[in-house]
Image: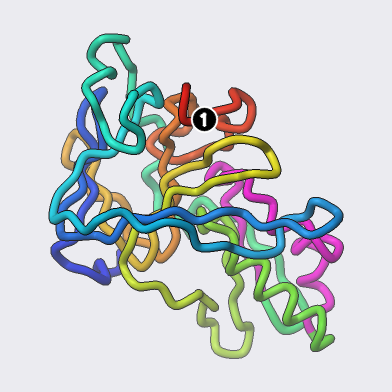
Amino acid sequence: MSKPAAPNAKVQITANGPYLVSGGLPLGTASIGVNAQGESVQWQAGRDYPPQAEYALCRCGHSANKPFCDGTHAKIGFDGSETASRKPYREQAKVFEGATMTLTDAESLCAAARFCDPNGQVWKQVNATDDPATHANFVRQTCDCPSGRLVAWDKQTGIAVEPKFEASIALIEDPAEHCLGPIWLRGGVQVVGADGFEYEVRNRVTLCRCGASKNKPFCDGSHIAIGFNEHS
């Protein structure tokens, strides 16, 4: 397990309750930008929330004060049981060996942001990463995967290619699917389970905030199926 990029920053999961964020993590929004064909092609920064040293983010999806908790989880009997695998990423991921790059894929972490799809999909691109244009698309699209389901590795060095993030949180918005997406932890933020378990620290992690994921605490794309929005 790597060390958190911001040692004092932490997301503490509470039993059937909110995420307690500490350490002054910046909070903002990020939207999935699409091209004329409706393909996910870029991240667009949105609003920034006023800085707070500590805050509680809704996990049940029904707060009237989104993204913050208002206690609704107790009224609706929210079941926030953590069911996701606690194995390190590399033990969960399938490996796809390519020309100059390797792709690892832990499918259960998919947050359905769809950056993997353009230009023939990253699983096919990896085989042609000796072509400069394909290589560039492969790295960019893989690095845009918010959940870290997909990671690109340089075959020569064995080092993962990762975007450089400051420790921060973004609330994903998905205009193309007319819904709100997960909580995006960036830059190596420690997540601690309700039982005290310390999840592997990673550069990219997406946490469920609609309450419907079957892979809690992580997002599994259920926000799209339920049409999660501000009024949910």
Q: Nearer the viewer, residue 16 or 86?
A: 16
Q: Which of the 4 image quadrants contains residue 188?
A: bottom left
- According to the picture, the residue beneath numbered tag 1 turns out to be 229
Q: What residue is shown at x 28% (from left), y 61% (from top)?
A: 26
Secondary structure type for disc 1: loop
Residue range highlighted in magenta: 102-129
Residue nearest the observer in this picture, 208 or 101: 208
Q: How many marks?
A: 1
- In the rendered image, residue 147, in percent from the top left (x then y), is placed at 51, 53
The residue depicted at 17 percent of the width and 54 percent of the height is 52
Residue 14 x/y as whole percent: 20, 32
Q: In the rendered structure, does residue 157 fall within the stretch colored magenta?
A: no
Q: Quadrant of residue 103?
A: bottom right
Residue 105 part of the magenta-drawn span:
yes
Residue shown at 72% from the left, 73% from the top: 138
Dot 1 surroundings within 10 Å: few (below 14), some, or many (20 or more)?
Answer: some
Q: Is residue 26 above or below residue 177?
A: below
Image coords of residue 123 (percent x, y): 76, 61
Rendered view: 144 above or below 38: below
The image quadrant that residue 121 belongs to is bottom right
Is residue 155 shown left or right of residue 129?
left
Q: Is residue 211 left or right of residue 76?
A: right
Q: Is residue 149 left or right of residue 175?
A: left
Along the line of sight, the residue nearer the viewer: 206 or 46: 46
Q: Nearer the viewer, residue 104 or 209?
A: 209
